[in-house]
Amino acid sequence: MPQPDVLVVGAGMAGLVAARELQHGGRRVLVVDKGRAVGGRMATRTVDGRRFDHGAQHISARDPGFAAEVERWVRAGVARVWLRTPSVSRPERGVEPRHAGVGGMRRIPEHLAAGLEVRTGVEVTRLDATAGGVVARAGSSAAGRGRVAIVTAPLPQAAGLLADSGLTAPAGLGDVEYDACLAVMPRLDGPSGLADGHRAPDDGPVAWLADNHHKGTSPGPAVTIHSTPEFAAAHLDEPPDGWVDALCAAAATHLDAPITAAVGHRWRYSMPRTTLDRGWAAVDRAPVLLAGEAFAGARVEGAYLSGVAVAAAAARLLTP
């Protein structure tokens, strides 16, 4: 089997979009990801028969190209309008539609991954630049190779991978800091009572509550609780029992039904506080490109736009 033209490390939105763009352009692409499934923070999990979107909750589209892509997802039956809410960051835009995956947010990256060669459960620990391109290693084993590599991990993880590979990170990467988020997935003993399926409390440790049954993700009552960045920073490395109970207690005052069981998940790199807004970055002395939401805006849209931009950059590198 011939060597892939491009090796993509990371099967989140940026990596899958880059891989798809390159494959549509006639390039052979291999995508590897350390997770058990594609999607990154567009994550959906089933616990005791209830389904939870425990990462990204919805999608807003402002860039015309991304808005057109979201409409293609709608026509494909993998996305739909869930909410219409006022824009907080840009009030002049008024009420905007918020899209969600049909049956869960992961449905969208699964749609993007269809037809791509994707290997999950592969944690890349080193990139070796060779005369023919780049070899990714998972421990002592070769995990994949390509004439060009695209890395879409959060920037602290990408910088660590480059350091372990003896490669120098591009200037500015270390200036990007991330907020963490602690997510809790409670099962309810009845309807949540959340108006329009969501709530953002004015104070306390809870930043956001989302009703997965209202959204159409879960067959039964189930909500997702996201902590504030401040609460996550204070409790990120603590055992989950304490912060799961604390967030459930805080959320209970907003719910009509009692919580019967809950599990937690840590998002150590939930969202970049600032972004570099240049689409992608190149590594010196190796055909390695970096991409992700930190390069184009801290939302699903930013990850998509970065994926499109880095695919174009990789194609240029591959053109004689």
Image: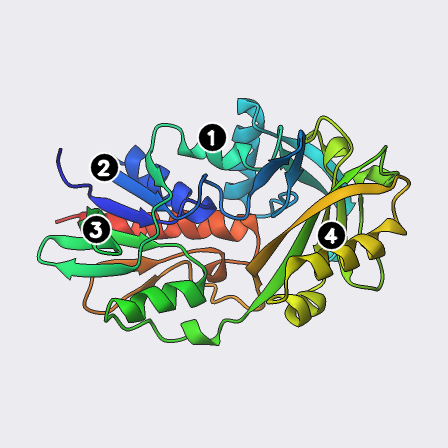
Q: Nearer the viewer, residue 103 or 47?
A: 47
Instruction: Look at 54% across and 36% down and name the residue there.
Output: 106
Residue type at mark 2: give it. Answer: Arg
> How crowded is the residue under tag 3: few (<14 C-alpha within 10 Å), some, or many (20+)?
few
Which residue is under mark 1? 111
Which residue is under mark 2? 28
Which residue is under mark 3? 141
Residue type at mark 1: give it. Answer: His
Residue type at mark 3: give it. Answer: Ser
Image quadrant occupied by the N terminus? top left
Q: Position of residue 3 (x, y in %)?
A: 15, 41
Residue 279 image-quadrant placement:
bottom left
Q: Earlier in the sequence, mark 1 or mark 3?
A: 1
The answer to whether residue 87 is above or below residue 192 is below
Instruction: Look at 48% across and 37% down and name the residue there.
Output: 109
> How crowded is the residue under tag 1: few (<14 C-alpha within 10 Å), some, or many (20+)?
some
